[in-house]
Image (cartoon, rainbow, N blue to C red):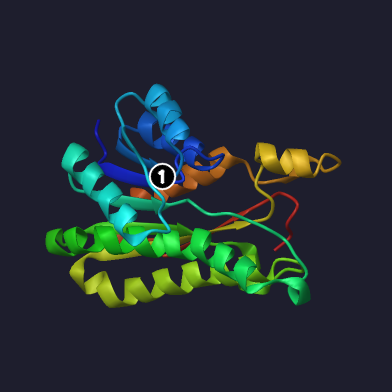
Amino acid sequence: MNQGRVAITGAAGAMGSVVARHFAKAGWRLGLIDYAEERIAELRRDFPDAHAVAADLTDEEAARHAIESIEEEAGPIDVLLNIAGGFAMQPADEATTDDLAKMHQINFVTLFNTSRAVLPAMKARGEGLVLGVSAAAALDGAPGAALYAAGKASVAAYLKSLHAELRADGVRTSVVYPMGVVDTPANRQSMPDSDPATWIARDEIAESMLHLARRSPRGHIRELKVFAPSIDS
């Protein structure tokens, strides 16, 4: 059964591709966005029924065109999953303004641009969900990750503010916090001596997002922390 229409950013990435697979299996109609054309070809192969678009979401006009393309092809977007983002570490006293701009652009501006693109239609219909991925570092900070933490804190603060402003119009937001290392190929490569069994499974995060997307206004979940087995609290 068709559950609705979902747009997923960063859809060809390690996390986005898993989320897309779970939503497709659950019967959702997919709109998939990623930045590289060769990745779009992969998405079209793996999800032949989806509408996939290449776009640099740090560019406001490109983000708007991507959302418009999905809505023209698949219909109004019921749920926007902002998964596009990135991580980098550097000592805080060595970070440059270029480092700051990069972390801010890929983690917050991408979400800002796509969210702004879907909000008018969601408000007009009186319903919609905008979800973003924050981080444990956004809550408590983390050594070597000050700029990343700041970008992810912006994600959470923006979405919480959107919810407060637009819930009377039927538009809701949710923030997902992976509380620990996520089990991705990149993390396995960068931490070969660690045990991935103590990390968060991508399938679990995807299922958590699916759960959030299925909530009605009477059972809405605004924030959800997904913990790794190695995290005590």
- Furthest residue in direction right, as rendered: 193
Q: Residue at x 63, y 66 (%)?
A: 99
- Residue 124: x and y, percent? 13, 62
Q: Residue at x 41, y 33 (%)?
A: 40
Using the rendered image of the protein, determine whether residue 39 is visible from the camera's viewpoint.
Answer: yes
Task: Choose top left, top right, bottom left or bottom right for residue 140.
Answer: bottom right
**Kind of residue sitting beneath label 1:** Leu
Q: Quadrant of the C terminus?
A: bottom right
Q: Is residue 91 left or right of residue 183?
A: right
Q: Residue at x 41, y 65 (%)?
A: 222
Q: Secondary structure at mark 1?
A: helix
Asked whether 75 or 214 is in front, the reply is 75
Residue, disc 1? 210
Instruction: Reply above or below: 58 against 78.
Output: below
Asked whether 159 or 72 is in front, the reply is 72
Instruction: Reply above or below: 26 against 64.
Output: above
Q: Is residue 73 left or right of residue 79?
A: left
Q: Is residue 112 left or right of residue 17?
A: left
Instruction: Reply above or below: 123 against 29.
Output: below
- Residue 158: x and y, percent? 42, 72
Q: Quadrant of the N terminus?
A: top left
- Residue 33: x and y, percent? 38, 43
Task: Choose top left, top right, bottom left or bottom right for residue 204.
Answer: top right
Q: Using a 10 Å C-alpha cutoff, classify the residue at mark 1 as few (fewer than 14 neighbours), some (14 to 19) or many (20 or more).
A: some
Q: Residue at x 76, y 38 (%)?
A: 189
Using the rendered image of the protein, determine whether residue 216 is visible from the camera's viewpoint.
Answer: no
- Residue 120: x and y, percent? 19, 63
Counting the numbered discs, the total is 1
